Image (cartoon, helix red, strand yellow):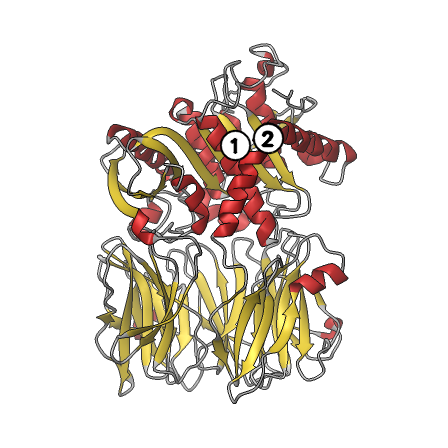
Amino acid sequence: MPTPPRAPRKLHLHTLHGHERPDSYHWLRSQGKADPEVLAYLQAENDHLAGVMAPLRAEQQAIYQELLSHVQERDEQPEVVRGAHAYFTRTETGQAHPLYLRRPLAGGEPQLLLDLNVLKAEEGLDNVWVYATAPSPDGRFWAYLLDTTGQEVFELRVLDTETGGLAQPPLRGLNGWVPAWSADGRALHYATDDATQRSYRLWRHQLGQPQTSDTLLFQEDDPTFRVGAWVSENGQTLLICSASTRAQEWWALSAHDTQGQPTRLLARERGTEVPVLTDGGDHWLALTNHGGAEEFKLVRWSRRADGAPLAWADAADVLPYDEGRHLQSGCLFQGHLLLAGREDGFTALWVLPRQGGGYGPAQRVPFPEASVTVGIGPNYVYDSAVARITYTSLTRPLEHLNLNLKTLETTLVKAAPVPNYDPALYVSEQVWATAPGGERIPVSLLRRRDTPLPAPTLLYGYGSYGLSVNPTFVAGRLPLVDRGWVWAIAHIRGGSERGRRWYDGGRLGQKMNTFTDFIAAGEALRAQGVSRELVAMGRSAGGLLMGSVVNLRPDLWTAALVGVPFVDVLSTMLDDTIPLTTAEYDEWGNPNRPEDYAVMAAYSPYDNLKAARYPHLFVSTGLNDPRVAYWEPAKYAARVRDLAAPDSGTVVLKTIMGAGHGGSSSRYEALNELAEEYAFVLAAVAGQLPATAASVHPGEGLQGGEARAHPSRA
């Protein structure tokens, strides 16, 4: 067994909440990612991983080849009509990145807009991501947001489609979510971040003018709010939203106005959420929880000639509140409104016809199966009677469908090709776990029909931000499932699988439910004869989940894949100078308040590590990650080793030096990274990974002030 690196201990009394807290690994953060000692330590961790994986590389390569065998290397995504062109991406065999193209609707050959493979080679880049693209309304220009480091700081490039060159120098230092054009195609709107990477300013840029002359349209000074902007479906209004978890404020500006300033449309009100608002022509249309509509309802306001802000007293229900129906998003067309949400725990779509200035009754779109995942796809043709939607399940690869908004009939546009896959060999199921307190937790299962039970099981979870882990097809699961594993998804509180109450039941003071739900799911899979060995998997906030459930029940798991994990909760949430902190007080709480501090201190994985027998842990991070900084997983892995009993599992830390939160941008590198994790857990379950080398004496990690004790709760 290769000897793991030992991070130097530098006792630091880190002041948190007015108390000095010992942290021997704070130096991994304070010295910074450019520090030679930090880089040397992270490289030593990568070298240790290489040593652990050396005897497993043949298995990793075999898994990689299996993953690759399910990839249609030369493929095209379905076309999306925008203006006079249909836009699409293409991947070529052997090329790691997509090509961006468009085809004239009037006829003619496709035009290549961007080849990321060429750009990466010409500019000598390790990684390259395109986050958003937007053609100008007349199609002359094509804008795209480019990230070359994984730090999620972007530059906006604008291609002149007539000349083939850039229309102007790139705009730099941008946020990644707002490239919106004016109606005349001569002005672009974009957002910039503050020092914590919180989008707080919205700008108007006149094409061809220097960035220094751009006009500031909106600035959000409340550090708990973030700014976004887009053009309404009818193309008439630039909608600006300043949003926190529990409130949104809306501003509007005519998309034809390239000189004016936005006006406030709807004031913010803490606890009142309006996540969706759009321009219906003579009215405004919104989803909201106003008036106690916990699962959201649909309302409208008549458009006022004087442009005065909207008042709740003037709002009229279009789709009244139904506690059994959770509304999440929508897309407005000239003759119909398409809504997406959840009903009976499953995703659903509804169509409302527009009739005489109003809306007819909502009709649920029928599908042949209940346990599928349906959603609204990209739609940019306002006067269309056909909407693009998506459809998938655990065993059914993604299908792009056209939905006739009048008849509710669907036609297949394209089914994602999955070579060497026979859906008849697989079965999806749902079982239930009972959490402490009696809440029933749904668990989705995927396995081969011929897999005998109990079987080794990978249990995946997330459970934060109201994001649902829906039962969708992922070809990357097949190598494990084909080896006789069960792939399980725990639909735990903190997501929205069972509506808004599900989300609220797993955040703030209820956050511990997220972790105990996941543990209950693992215990139920064992008790019901589904699972033998259990491997847990989660990323980001799901990495927080991994750290917490390993602390609470280290005996339950054979191994855990702990991806880009948010594990040093107290240190991070008490530092309002780093990304995401202030904007997420409504998710985790504000630890400057004693009651919130106590809740976080009870589950923060790094702070609750103790002397114990830990399972095998594969911890991963990206050096440039702006969402969960490299030092969180690095500190976590080091401290686990300090406290792990001699018969604990192997702990490895992988740092991708040129990437951020999402890992490598190359599709081939991403497959290889997944194959490495699979090879690790297969070896863990097979008993081929020895217990960690006992390079410290039991209890050594408790010296020098490292003993875990909750700071006093003032």
Residue at disc 2, secondary structure: helix
Tell me if residue 187 comes above or below residue 643 in the rendering. below
Classify 10 Å Cα crowding around label 1: few (below 14), some (14-19), many (20 and above): many
Question: Residue sitting at 56 percent across and 11 percent down?
Answer: 699
- In which image quadrant can residue 505 be found? top left
Tell me if residue 357 comes above or below residue 682 in the rendering. below
Q: Is residue 112 visible?
A: yes
Counting from the top left corner in percent of width and height, residue 181 is at: 58, 78
Classify 10 Å Cα crowding around label 2: few (below 14), some (14-19), many (20 and above): many
Counting from the top left corner in percent of width and height, residue 15 is at: 62, 30
Tell me if residue 98 comes above or below residue 479 in the rendering. below
Residue most extreme to the front = 420
Tell me if 236 is positioned left or right of 702 in this view. left
Closest to the observer: 519 or 246?
A: 519
Counting from the top left corner in percent of width and height, residue 407 is at: 24, 79
Q: Earlier in the sequence, mark 1 or mark 2?
A: 2
The amino acid type, in three-letter code, at marker 2 is Met
Closest to the observer: 670 or 214?
A: 670
Question: Residue sitting at 76 percent across and 31 percent down?
Answer: 37
Question: Residue sitting at 37 percent across and 53 percent down?
Answer: 472
Question: Residue sitting at 43 percent across and 26 percent down?
Answer: 558
Q: Is residue 574 visible?
A: no
Tell me if 362 is positioned left or right of 2 in this view. left
Q: What number is the disc on residue 680?
A: 1
The residue that label 2 is drawn on is: 53
Closest to the observer: 70 or 310?
A: 70
Q: Are marks 1 and 2 in contact (CB under 8 Å)?
A: yes
The amino acid type, in three-letter code, at marker 1 is Phe
Residue most extreme to the right = 36
Q: CA distance from mark 1 to mark 2?
A: 7 Å
Q: Quadrant of the N terminus?
A: top right
Counting from the top left corner in percent of width and height, residue 262 is at: 54, 76
